[in-house]
Image (cartoon, rainbow, N blue to C red):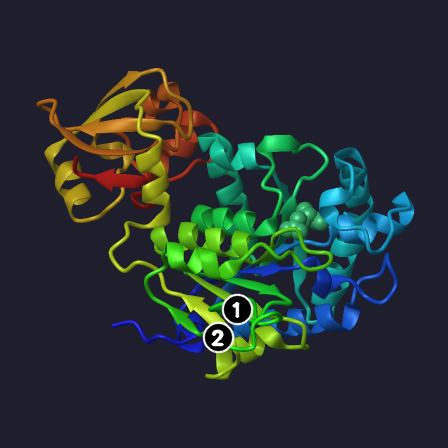
Amino acid sequence: MIDLSTSKVLQNSKLIVIKVGSVLVRGDALDQVNQTWMDALAQDVCALKDAGKKVVIVSSGGVALGRKALGIAADMPPADIPLAKKQASSAVGQYHLFNGYHHAFAKVGMHAAQVLLTMSETENRRMNLNAREALYTLLDNEIVPIINENDVVSTGEIRFGDNDRLSVRVAQMVLADAVVLLSTTDGLYTDNPDTNPEAVFIPVIENLGDEHVSMAGDAVPGLSTGGMKSKIEAAFSATKTGIHLVISNGKENHALQKLVSVYDKKSSLFVAHENSANARKMWIGAHMSPKGFVAIDDGAASALQKGKSLLPIGVREVSGDFRRGDVIEIRSLNGKKLAMGLSAYNANDARQIAGEQSSDIHRILGYIGRDELVHRNDMVVGD
Ligand code: GLU
């Protein structure tokens, strides 16, 4: 049974993606971060870490913090800035942005890591797998990834454009439990509260539908790129892949800590669909064209049915020419399709370690790879 409040959902989450909007990180001067706000966020993240949780931050602010160097007026809406200028501004501002996070986390004895992603990378299986492993390694070392879109190389229709979508994509990549979008918006109202005094706030949305899209409206305030529409789209994507999404106003210091611990901190919670397969499996499902297959013995087949990973020792045959991160079919010895999954090894290496103990992988291949040929998180069992 799921308890329907933001604080309960966040308390039950092990891995949380926090998206920070440009307005929150920028200080009074055009090229300065709001260090006090960032320091408070780092303290909140540190407290979550001490409570056994992992946090990934997706932060906007690159374009906003580079405006001064590029001579872009403070009040020019992001949509009106020419793309090349926006990219250049982001290249300047990203330094200020990460520098602010670096200092904030150093004060609480933690490291922050700068990660710049593009949309095409997150859609490419191998790159997605690489990015995920790098992010997991950072998190295992209690380092906080600070992610932004790599604005300089991502252009036109292949851009995420707004970090609402990027943060959900990241959450799907790392199998996060929840995404929190911190901006200057309280959450979802039945209508625009600035123009309609009758507008009613909606704290919990269990079944997100088209009616919520029309409530969102098009208004995009100040420095922000996304606005409510892009947040609702992000909520659709998150909830259908089993990830809760929260929208809340992050302007006050320690907004994150309040969302976790104060039951009635104002926020809209979009509840994840209960029966959705996990995010990664949905993603594999959408990219189902196997580049090869492996035939596995009966022991490995029954391990798969119990939800275990596929280890090299159970593999009898490797066929096809696939690369690490490609989808492969997993078959029984008599050719029956058992599962699909992402291979952690290319076909040649898979052939060499087939039938061998995972502890021998290093000796056989000359490098330390994963123990599993296909990890259970990367596998869809059955037809
Ligand atoms: N990558 C953009 C920046 O750093 C953020 C886009 C957004 O506002 O979501 O400014």
- State which tag comes first along the sequence, 1 or 2: 1
Observer-nearest of 125 and 335: 125
Q: Is residue 26 left or right of residue 346?
A: right
Secondary element at image label 2:
strand
Quarter of the figure with residue 8:
bottom left
Amino acid on which disc 1 is placed: Gly
Determine if residue 251 is in view: yes
Residue named by callout 1: 187
Q: Write the residue at 73% across / 56% down.
A: 223
Observer-nearest of 368 and 191: 191
Total numbered labels placed on residues in the image: 2
Q: Is residue 103 left or right of residue 325?
A: right
Residue 254, image x, y percentages:
63, 77
Observer-nearest of 183 and 357: 183
Quarter of the figure with residue 289:
top left
Picture layout, residue 240 above or below residue 55: above
Residue 240, image x, y percentages:
35, 52
Residue named by callout 2: 201
The quadrant in which the N terminus is found is: bottom left
Observer-nearest of 219 and 355: 219
Residue 160, image x, y percentages:
58, 41
The quadrant in which the C terminus is found is: top left
Q: Residue furthest top?
A: 320
Q: Which mark is residue 316?
A: none
Q: Write the residue at 70% across / 58% down.
A: 22
Q: Is mark 1 within 8 Å of ligand 1?
A: no
